[in-house]
Amino acid sequence: MSAVSQTRLLGGLSLLVILLCSISLLIGPAGFSIADSLTALFSGTGDAISLVMQEIRLPRALLAIMVGISLGLSGAALQGYLRNPLAEPGLIGVSSSAALGAVITLQTGIAAQMMIILPFFGLLGAAIAVVLLLLLAGPRGGSLTLILAGIAISALAGALTSLVLNLSPNPFATSEIVFWMLGSLADRSFAHIWIALPFMALGWVLILSTARGLDALILGEDAAASLGINLGVLRWVLVAGVAACTGAATSVVGAIGFVGLVVPHILRPFVGARPSRLLPASALGGAALVLAADIAARLILPDRDLKLGVVMAIIGAPIFLHLIYRTRRAEL
């Protein structure tokens, strides 16, 4: 793929994100006109419409972009590193551990004392998962060891989450936990953005810094090492970046699946085999997909709280099945 084609693709995806972000800002049950909405967004003075635009719709749209970038980028990076198109951000167990940390705060009632506690505990769960991953896989563990360690951590976190639900004496807490785990951008504020953004930004920088190493890995680990790539450093920089991105995303919006799995598959035919070109495209593609899914969640059942994670699964599963069918036909 030429540099011009790459630029056009990234430009097209950027315009798509801007368009979907604009739609996200302008739709809602309040029924404001476009002119009034834009005026309130950019020069609001504290009235009701200004509060809706600046404190409800704007944080929701920005958080959708941040989550989409994080999950799309993480999925493309893991698929490039493991050279496995089925790899996705939840593979290393960080998202499950972040969800466990958040679930514990909901079950114990700590989250009710202060809204910000829940994402902080989610990030703590993600950090513990990284430490466990380092202990299990070791600083020099190979790709297979990393996958097995991630699966073990994910299974343990899932089992502990189920245990919390099973032992919950409060049906209201159980209901709150279940609905939170479905994933949603509703009722999020700029406080959630300021908590998640530093971790996500760190993750973006770390993942993008591995682009050269991921390109070299196309030739195999031995060839990459002969080109001067330190595979141990590459592995843990990438794991830290993915953990920061997915841990922060799960902590503030719950579990959102399929983004990191489907988006790289959709965009790979347009960018070729080089991961360095797929990373920025997947970041923008992930942002567009999460924005589109959130818009769909608000339009399909406007008087019901349809969860983003449910809509994402409904959108993502058929797309992934189609990609599998197309791949199978190409192999025949």
Image (spheres, rainbow, N blue to C red):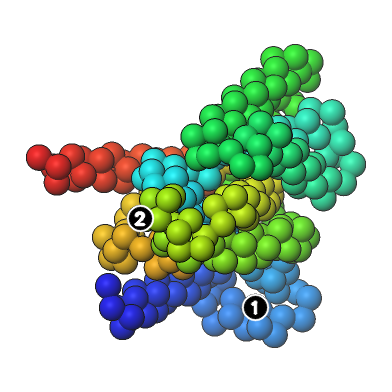
Image height check: is 176 above or below 46? Answer: above
Left/right placement of residue 23 relative to residue 112 reads left
Q: Could you classify mark 2 by the number of other residues whose Cα lies within 10 Å: few (under 14), some (14-19), or many (20 or more)?
A: few
Quarter-of-image position of residue 207:
bottom right
Q: Name the one closer to the observer, 35 or 19.
A: 19
State the image coordinates of residue 76 (x, y, percent, origin top left): 45, 55
State the image coordinates of residue 243 (x, y, percent, origin top left): 64, 48
Residue at the image point whose x is 63% and y is 29% from the top: 153
Name the amino acid, label 1.
Leu
Query: Spatial distance from mark 2 to mark 1, Cα to Cα?
Result: 50 Å
Quadrant location, the N terminus = bottom left
Tag 1 residue: 41
Residue at the image point whose x is 18% and y is 39% from the top: 328
Residue 288 in sight in this render:
no
Left/right placement of residue 55 relative to residue 281 reads right
**Dot 2 and dot 1 residues touching (CB under 8 Å):** no
Left/right placement of residue 315 relative to residue 290 reads left
Tag 2 residue: 219
Query: In the rendered structure, which disc, 2 or 1, sits on the residue that comes first in sequence?
Result: 1
Left/right placement of residue 160 relative to residue 320 reads right
Q: Secondary structure at mark 1?
A: helix
Name the amino acid, label 2.
Leu
Q: Farthest front residue?
A: 226
Residue at the image point whose x is 53% and y is 39% from the top: 142
Which-is-in-front pick, marks 2 and 1? 2
Image height check: is 107 above or below 281? Answer: above
Residue 105 in sight in this render:
yes
Q: Could you classify mark 1 by the number of other residues whose Cα lies within 10 Å: few (under 14), some (14-19), or many (20 or more)?
A: many
Q: Secondary structure at mark 2?
A: loop
Quadrant location, the C terminus = top left
Residue at the image point whose x is 62% and y is 54% from the top: 233
Q: Name the one closer to the observer, 96 or 85.
A: 85
